[in-house]
């Protein structure tokens, strides 16, 4: 699937505005809105090089307070490097990063006071029992709360009397989640939190992420599972080869659709050389993009409310019309196939 | 600078190893005193005199060994004692960064509001504290042995030397007299404090070295290998330096040259309790006063720890493997 040039322009616009529901940085007066408008994470010109390997390249990113922000990208895209730089595990080659206004490079300890982090491969002391692990991290983390961690563990149906060394991979993941989600830190960074979990527990974890957002906390959610990103995130950033190639508001993405139909008797059509050429009328050009025309089959990508388009679509006399939500999968494929990346890169 | 939660965690983590080493050192020191009492001093001297040619390989001159204090002081150079100390120091020192990186647990711990310096110093507090307690337990074992051991000594009959010869003729044909006495009557357990300090200094040096190498690495097995390799090379250098006068200069390049617990204890017998704590008064092959040598090991350990802090603070931490 190709990504139309006009859509590219729209997406570029999304990068600066964060789309529906997120573009609140200029709203004033409302305290909650102002708080939300503050950046929880701000990254500017961040680069990281390991010898000849460029892990991050000139990354600019802003994550607003109170949002669930998804990080998407193939393996080696730089998601974990970005997270580890924010936590002070890695010193960037250049650029700046701040978390809740604190310089992440100069004062990483203060940053980690504000953050609860779940690594992609969480390893816990094997010689401790589950309960001991929860107590240990609750004592260690200023925002730690043992009772909340116990509640999370109970919700995930975790046996805390077992030694970590005797736990299954899924149980260890649950334990790590109990440590991280039990904390009252204002920023949660979750790197593939649902890995190794069964579908029921995955649902519980996603529900807890949503609840964390309801409590006013910010969540950075890195995952390869697109449906999870679609379910919980407000905004998603696509990384590829260390570059931020695109940001997308999930709110506006949900307003995008793909219409596939056969054309029978279409006004404003040009049938020269046996090929149907569809011209979108002026009033709808902001809303509709002709993605492809093959024989009498046409594919249209739409942005925004479908309702105003319905009279025009009805007037075209389309047959066998099918309307699909333009999901994250399609966007992910478009971006990471790479054919039109030049146009998408910031 | 030190986080009590981390200290508790590291102490629990190392408890089994520490308990094993502690039991071994305490019981060995006690038993070693008892075994020492079983060997008749006269016979011991006769046996040892046969090996005068190899005296240069020993940490101290044979004459110092012809006392009960000198024989008990040999405990500090016994393989069991050195091995237990080395095992504790290398295993704890190598654990701090590369060990936790290998296990993958460093990621979750450093994700909390803890600086890397705090983590390293908390680990060091447990390791150094554990080492100090181990050496004190060794001393305690020696003290218990000295307090509870009765030795028997054969008193040779008086002799007279035939003029112009090397022959000595006994003046009596009576059977030699055997005398029993409490070891504590002949040996002061406090004399060994200086040797205990030397052992601690050696352990502290190895702890610092292991910690520094650990802070550079991400694999514990490689850290342990590097420390053991350095240890063996240093031992070989020291051995070569002892083997011949031509190579005696090599001893200056080995940290084992600074480990002289038996000489320190001998100093107590020669110069009183403060003898081994002097900065001046070099004897035999020494360049400096007796206390300088263990202090050099301690200073070396401090420098290694400082280097480990600098390296650990600056390095990028790789994701768990």
Image (cartoon, coloured by chain):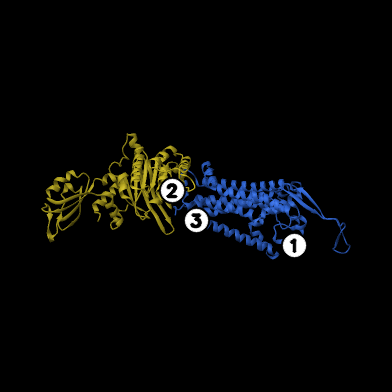
Point out residue A334 in the picture as x, y percentages from the top left corner.
28, 54
Q: Which residue is drawn at the image coordinates 53% and 41% (left, top)?
A: B4
Nearer to the camera, B210 or A37: B210
Per the model, the C-alpha gap separating discs 1 and 2 is 61 Å
Q: Secondary structure at mark 1?
A: helix
Q: Quadrant of residue B250?
A: bottom right
Per the model, the C-alpha gap separating discs 3 and 2 is 24 Å
Q: Chain of mark 3?
A: B
The residue labelled by disc 1 is B52
Per the model, the C-alpha gap separating discs 1 and 3 is 46 Å
Q: Visible in this render: residue B170?
A: yes
Nearer to the camera, B231 or B168: B168
Residue A167: mark? 2
Q: Secondary structure at mark 2?
A: loop
Q: Colour of chain B?
A: blue
Task: Characterize the local packing of mark 1: few (<14), some (14-19) or many (20 or more) Cα atoms within 10 angstroms.
Answer: few
Q: Colour of chain A?
A: yellow
């Amino acid at each position: 699937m190709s990504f139309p040039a006009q859509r590219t322009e729209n997406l570029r616009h999304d990068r600066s505005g964060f789309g529906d529901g997120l573009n609140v940085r200029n709203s004033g007066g409302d305290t909650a809105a102002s708080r939300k408008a503050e950046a929880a994470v701000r990254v500017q010109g961040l680069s990281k090089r390991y010898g000849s390997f460029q892990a991050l390249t000139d990354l600019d990113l802003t994550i607003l307070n109170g949002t669930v922000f998804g990080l998407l990208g193939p393996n080696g895209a730089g998601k974990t490097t970005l997270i580890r730089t924010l936590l002070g595990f890695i010193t960037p080659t250049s650029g700046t990063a701040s978390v809740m206004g604190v310089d992440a490079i100069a004062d990483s300890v203060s940053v980690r006071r504000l953050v609860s982090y779940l690594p992609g491969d969480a390893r816990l002391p094997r010689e401790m029992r589950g309960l001991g692990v929860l107590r240990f991290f609750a004592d260690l983390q200023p925002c730690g709360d043992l009772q909340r961690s116990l509640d999370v563990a109970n919700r995930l149906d975790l046996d805390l009397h077992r030694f970590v060394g005797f736990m299954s991979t899924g149980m260890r993941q649950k334990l790590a989640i109990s440590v991280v989600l039990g904390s009252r830190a204002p920023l949660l960074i979750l790197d593939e939190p649902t890995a190794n979990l069964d579908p029921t527990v995955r649902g519980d974890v996603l529900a807890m992420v949503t609840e964390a957002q309801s409590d006013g906390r910010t969540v950075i959610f890195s995952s390869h599972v697109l449906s999870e990103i679609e379910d919980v995130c407000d905004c998603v950033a696509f990384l590829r080869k260390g570059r931020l190639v695109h940001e997308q508001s999930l709110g506006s993405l949900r307003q995008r659709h793909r219409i596939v139909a056969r054309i029978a008797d279409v006004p404003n059509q040009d049938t020269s050389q046996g090929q149907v050429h569809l011209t979108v009328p002026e009033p709808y050009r902001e809303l509709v993009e002709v993605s492809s025309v093959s024989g009498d089959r046409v594919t249209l990508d739409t942005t925004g409310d479908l309702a105003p388009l319905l009279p025009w679509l009805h007037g075209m006399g389309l047959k066998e019309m099918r309307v699909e939500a333009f999901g994250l999968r399609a966007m992910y494929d478009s971006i990471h196939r790479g054919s039109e990346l030049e146009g998408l890169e910031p | 600078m030190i986080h009590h939660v981390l200290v508790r965690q590291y102490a629990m983590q190392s408890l089994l190893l520490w308990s094993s080493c502690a039991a071994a050192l305490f019981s060995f020191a006690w038993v070693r005193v008892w075994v020492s009492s079983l060997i008749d001093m006269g016979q011991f001297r006769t046996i040892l005199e046969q090996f005068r040619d190899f005296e240069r390989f020993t940490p101290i001159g044979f004459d110092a060994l012809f006392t009960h204090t000198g024989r008990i002081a040999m405990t500090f150079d016994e393989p069991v004692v050195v091995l237990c100390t080395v095992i504790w120091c290398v295993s704890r020192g190598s654990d701090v960064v590369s060990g936790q990186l290998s296990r993958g647990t460093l990621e979750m711990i450093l994700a909390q509001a803890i600086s890397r310096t705090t983590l390293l110093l908390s680990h060091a507090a447990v390791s150094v504290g554990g080492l100090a307690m181990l050496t004190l337990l060794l001393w305690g074992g020696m003290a218990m042995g000295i307090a509870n051991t009765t030795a028997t000594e054969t008193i040779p009959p008086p002799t007279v030397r035939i003029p112009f010869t090397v022959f000595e003729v006994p003046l009596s044909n009576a059977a030699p007299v055997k005398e029993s006495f409490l070891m504590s009557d002949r040996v002061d357990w406090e004399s060994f404090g200086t040797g205990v300090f030397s052992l601690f200094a050696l352990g502290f040096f190895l702890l610092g070295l292991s910690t520094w190498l650990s802070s550079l690495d991400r694999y514990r097995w490689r850290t342990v290998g590097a420390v053991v390799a350095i240890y063996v090379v240093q031992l070989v250098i020291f051995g070569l330096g002892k083997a011949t006068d031509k190579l005696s200069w090599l001893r200056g390049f080995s940290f084992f040259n600074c480990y002289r617990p038996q000489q320190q204890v001998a100093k107590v017998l020669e110069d009183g309790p403060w003898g081994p704590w002097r900065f001046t008064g070099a004897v035999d092959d020494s360049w400096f006063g007796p206390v300088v040598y263990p202090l050099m090991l301690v200073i070396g350990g401090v420098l290694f720890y400082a280097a480990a802090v600098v390296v650990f603070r600056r390095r990028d931490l790789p994701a768990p493997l």
